[in-house]
Amino acid sequence: KAGVTQTPRYLIKTRGQQVTLSCSPISGHRSVSWYQQTPGQGLQFLFEYFSETQRNKGNFPGRFSGRQFSNSRSEMNVSTLELGDSALYLCASSPGRSSYNSPLHFGNGTRLTVT
Amino acid sequence: DQQVKQNSPSLSVQEGRISILNCDYTNSMFDYFLWYKKYPAEGPTFLISISSIKDKNEDGRFTVFLNKSAKHLSLHIVPSQPGDSAVYFCAASGDSWGKLQFGAGTQVVVTP
């Protein structure tokens, strides 16, 4: 079974631009969550989607948004990029229901650098 | 507000010895706890978990202990191996499974 796939692996953008990151969950998984990892803040929860609906949102500004498609694939978008948005963005998937029997599985992330 | 805390940023242990990683939490609504291991340039990999109704869970070399009254959990790795050198994250889940609160991580180095 293929794992969680995130594209692209690396991205360099300039301040003020916007960026879209993509995530394909494990086949059969209907829940997708996004996390931001920075050296200073650790792993911070961004949002969680289940069956195309946002189920939870973390404490991030409105410049961060996401969506989930009917095939469970997910994208997150960051508009008006700031230097502080430089981070590793991680996507994770789980079956969604009865999920205490199955932990979150993470992809290898997209490394975003804002210059 | 850091609800999950790993107060030791690093741990060095000799190969074959026990590694003990600690984690404290403040939110009594957390009902599931997990440990993840992370290598550089990779995503976190699930290691072991424990429900709040238990006080111990074991899987091979890994054992997690939960002390609810102290809001404390620990991960024991016995025996430690060089491949265990990585960053270990403690995480907790409360209101939704996909929303985990992570600790800051502990860098473990296993020396020969």
Image: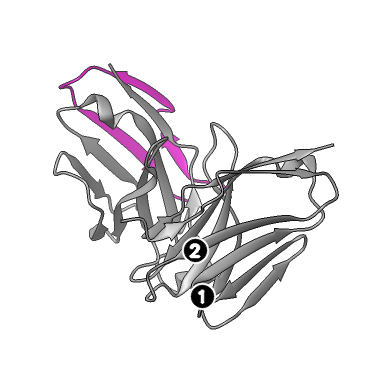
Kind of residue sitting beneath label 1: Ala
Q: Which mark is residue B70?
A: 1
x then y, percent, for residue B102: 44, 54
**SS at mark 2 in the image:** strand
Q: Which mark is residue B56?
A: none
| Residue A95 visible in the picture | no
| Residue A69 visible in the picture | yes
State the quadrant of the N terminus of chain B.
bottom left
x then y, percent, for residue B108: 66, 43
Tell whether label 2 touches label 1 (CB within 8 Å).
yes
| Lower sequence index among marks 1 and 2 | 2
Q: Is residue A91 above or below residue B57?
A: above
Relative placement, left or right, of A56 versus A28 is left
Kind of residue sitting beneath label 2: Asp
Residue drawn 27% across the image and 29% down it? A84
Q: Which mark is residue B24?
A: 2
Residue drawn 36% across the image and 32% down it? A87
Residue drawn 23% across the image and 58% down it? A54
Q: Are marks 1 and 2 on the same chain?
A: yes
